[in-house]
Each structure stands twice: as structure tokens, then as C-alpha cells.
Image (cartoon, helix red, strand yellow):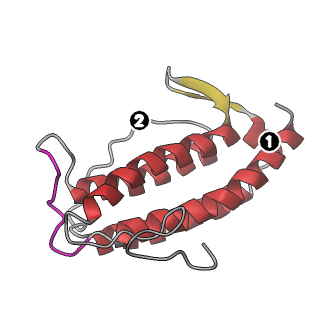
Amino acid sequence: MENSQARLIFNVLMAQLEQEIATTRRVLAAVPAGKEDYRPHPVSKSALDLAWHLATSDYWFLASIARGQFIAEEARLPEGVRSAPDVVAWYDRNVPPLIERLKTLPDEELARIVPMFDIMRLPAVQYLLVMMLHAAHHRGQLSAYLRPMGGRVPAIYGASADEQPSSTA
């Protein structure tokens, strides 16, 4: 991939990524208080564990792209994170600065081939798409938990039965 191609792809994906980040934040914030232990099946993650996985995976992908290297890190739930608002606060503190950092990466860093362990070898910029697909998958899981927990499903890619999309979504 040419450096200029990487920048073009970055610009296209970044516009979508910023919308995806806002959507993820809305889904995280929709987890009802007191329902963090909910799981639809014994083998399913709890709502809090799934929310934490979603939040930290976005961070991990962005940090990996920024440093040009994927490192296996276990994102254990910290003692201070016990609710959806805690996850949202962590997300708000950690994800936006990484978005801004990515915007400063030179084109050659975006075009550089970065191995993700033995799974794939892609130009760094393409991992933004992998990240968005991963987030959409887990956001879908978490959104399916919301109504059974007594919560409301936010508009994601259009209206839900609980919420109409905002004009800026």
C-alpha cells in the first residue's frame, strides 16, 4: 500500500470510526444500574464484563495501531470499575486521546505492515476496520442484553423501538 493510499483510507475510516465510538459509548451507557451481573446464559459474559471487553478492546486496537505493534494484554476489570458509568468514564478518559494520537501518525506509519500475532498481517490503517467490526459484534451482543435487563436499546444504525436516532448520528 502506498503512503497516500493509507492516508486516504484513514480519512474515510476515521469519519466512520468517530461515529462508531459515539455509538459504543451510548450502548455502554445504556446498561441499567444494578444489572451489571446479568447474563442471558451461564456461559455468557456478564453485562459488566462484556461492557468492559468492548471498551478495552477499542482501546487495545487504537493503542496497537498507534505503537505499530500488537501486544497480548489482559484487560482485567479494575477494582474501581463496578458499573456502566465507571466503564463509560474509563472509555471517555482513554479512547479520545488515542483517536487524536492516530490523527498525528505519518502516512508511512499508517501504511506499514503490522503483524497481529500469527492471525493477520495488514497495513496499520486496516486494523481500524477490524476494530470497528469487532466492536459492532460485541455492541450487538450487549444491546441484546439491554431489554431483558429492563434497559432501553439506543439507536445504533437507525431507530430502535426505544429511541429515534439523533439528527447528528
Q: How far apart are marks 2 and 1 (CA)?
A: 25 Å
- Residue 72 is tagged as 2
- In this view, the residue in front, 129 or 155, is 155
- Identify the residue at horizontal 31%, vertical 56% (top origin): 144
Q: Find the residue positioned furthest to the bottom.
A: 167
Whether 104 is drawn above or below 110: the answer is below
Q: Give residue 155's position: percent from left, percent from top.
A: 47, 69
Q: How many C-alpha atoms fall within 10 Å of the one at disc 2: few (<14), some, or many (≥20)?
A: few
* Tag 2: amino acid: Ala
- Judged left or right of residue 98, residue 56 is left
Q: How many C-alpha atoms fall within 10 Å of the one at disc 1: few (<14), some, or many (≥20)?
A: many
- In this view, the residue in front, 154 or 13, is 154
Does the image show residue 70? Answer: yes
Does the image show residue 90? Answer: no
Question: Is label 2 or label 1 in front?
Answer: 1
CB under 8 Å between callouts 2 and 1?
Answer: no
Residue underneath mark 1: 6
